[in-house]
Image (tube, helix red, strand yellow):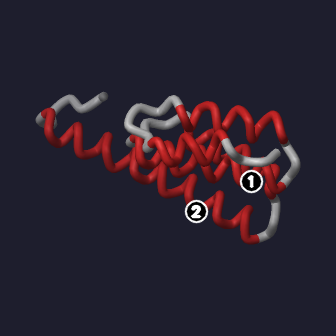
Amino acid sequence: CFCFAKSQINCFIILFTNVFKIYSVFIYIIEIFDEYKDYTNSKYYLRELLKTSLLPEEKSKYWLKLADTCHLTEDWEGESHALTELVVIKGVSYNLISDAANRRV
């Protein structure tokens, strides 16, 4: 962080604010592409969002959304990858893993 005269807490707040803005922008962009049924771009931005630092609950939510979008576009490889990433997240419930394993492709 390039904060020269600021305290570390102020630097952290600035960094956190910027990360939150990026996260919010990704969510907004994904919603727009979904609204216009542009699922190719929606998948791209979901993948970009998943590259950011997210809490495990958020990660599982967006991996599942990516799997659903891939299923909708008949991207079976993408769906399989998203479900695999979903089930390896620490703390994911057994029910979610079971549901992922029982999805029909």
* 65 lies above or below 94: below
Amino acid at circle 2: Tyr
State the CA–CA distance, disc 1 to disc 2.
16 Å
Residue 48: where, in percent of width, then height?
62, 40
Please state if 36 lies on the left or on the right of 3 as rendered. Answer: right
Residue 20: where, in percent of width, then height?
39, 51
What residue is pinned by disc 1? 69
Q: Dot 1 surroundings within 10 Å: few (below 14), some, or many (20 or more)?
A: many
- Where residue 91 sits, quadrant-wise, is top left
Please state if 37 lies on the left or on the right of 31 as rendered. Answer: right
Can you tell which of label 1 and label 2 is closer to the viewer?
Answer: 1
Viewer-proximal residue among 39 and 9: 39
What residue is pinned by disc 2? 28
Residue 85: where, in percent of width, then height?
59, 32
Viewer-proximal residue among 78 and 21: 78
Q: Residue at x 73, y 35 (%)?
A: 80
Indicate the secondary structure of the residue bearing disc 2.
helix
Amino acid at circle 1: Thr
Please state if 27 lies on the left or on the right of 55 as rendered. Answer: right
Viewer-proximal residue among 90 and 17: 90
Indicate the secondary structure of the residue bearing disc 1.
helix
* 86 lies above or below 104: above
